Amino acid sequence: MPDVTIRGAGIFGLSIAWACLQRGARVQVIDPGGVGAGSSGGIVGALAPHTPENWNSKKAFQLDSLLLAGTFWAEIDATSGLSSGYARSGRLQPIPDEIALERAKNRGRNAETLWQGKAVWEVVQADRDWAPLSPTGYLIHDTLSARIHPRQACAALAAAITARGGRILSDAPDQGAVIWATGAHGLDQLSQELGRPVGGPNKGQAALLQPAAPLPPDAPQIFADTVHVIAHADGTIAIGSTSEPVFDDPAATDGKLDAVIARARAAVPALHDATLISTWAGLRPRSRSRAPVLGTYPGRAGHFIANGGFKIGFGMAPRIATVMADLVLDGADHIPDEFRLEPPGTA
């Protein structure tokens, strides 16, 4: 009989399942849609940090998670025999003017302390082939950002879970502690149950391109004109994404994605001759606070919530997996107050 049932086979559900298995728990993951059926089955995979300023527990939590990611995904890849596409390859951002240049330098000084010497935020010259255009001729380069291929990462996690004896099912009764990691639909359900807005779906659209010439395997991600450009390990380049709180068809791409692709091509000269090979659209779980929603499920003894990974789910997942396993298996609560649905000590 399972010790833990996890509802939802997206990045939060799968990561928590893996953490529980590593501690000896018997785990089943249940999702009628299959692995990565929601936004976790996307194509972008930008694991990017918050700016090193105005520090708070949310930013500290994310830092810890990004620093854990290398070991986390290496173990997944080794156990599954598959590639998650993870690499801590850094990120480049253009600096538009002198004010932004001075701000970037100040943030670099902050990073020396806040990032504990484990990564840097620095200003560099824009004198490289794989880079965005920059009006000042300078770029922000940080070495904390990483890339991952979301769809491949979920497949690797699922394979690692089954290799360790966990089960992934389309349907089964709840057994043991129950963790609800049900994405956008789950946030809607919570809002209805609690009679107050917790969060809901936000549509995203993204594209996958094939570059005209191969990029270096360690090419950094680029963030320019509000667009993420990710050079994946398989040679493709992902571009995304839109952020649409209001939408008609959640699974269709449209002119909004065309505009994103156009902005990316304008910002990054190396994309001018890249070929569009596929697109993606889907719903992402955005909590009202934009932070993850973690902790006990109000009114349901033995039930827990892990949701709200809007834009930062893959980057937060290694640390979220750890704190949720702590809570569910050991009763140890290390969840930041900003992530709680209910105040500490309530259920």
Image: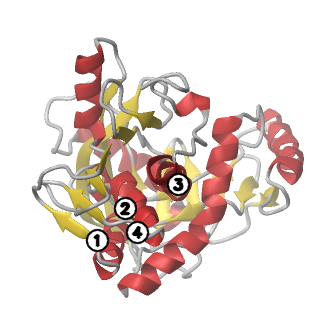
Contact between marks 2 and 3 (CB within 8 A): the answer is no
Residue 274 seen: no
Whether the residues at callouts 4 and 2 have beta carbons within 8 Å, the answer is yes
Front residue of 27/213: it is 27
Tell me whether the residue at label 1 lies in contact with that at label 2, contact meaning CB atoms closer than 8 angstroms. Answer: yes
Q: Secondary structure at mark 1?
A: loop
Whether residues under marks 4 and 1 lie with C-beta atoms below 8 angstroms apart, the answer is yes
Mark 4 vs mark 3: which is more N-terminal? 4
Residue bearing mark 1: 166
Which comes before the other along the chain, label 1 or label 2? 2
Q: Quadrant of residue 119?
A: bottom right
Q: Vertically, is 116 above or below 97?
A: below
What is the distance, in whole Å, between disc 4 and disc 3 at their CAs?
20 Å
> Closer to the N terminus: mark 4 or mark 1?
4
- Secondary structure beneath disc 3? helix
Say which quadrant the C terminus sits in: top left
* Amino acid bearing label 4: Leu
Residue 215 - label: none
Q: Residues within 10 Å of mark 4 (few under 14, many from 20)?
A: many
Q: Residue at x 58, y 29 (%)?
A: 338
Which residue is identified by label 3? 315
Label 2 or label 3, whichever comes before in sequence order: 2
Badge 2 amino acid? Ala
Query: Which mark's residue is nearer the viewer, 3 or 1?
Result: 1
Question: Residue 199 in the image: x percent, y percent?
Answer: 35, 25
For badge 3, the amino acid type reads Gly
Image x and y of residue 247, in percent: 21, 29
Badge 1: few (under 14), some or many (20 or more) residues near its Cα, within 10 Å? many
Q: Which residue is mark 4?
A: 21
Under tag 4, what secondary structure? helix
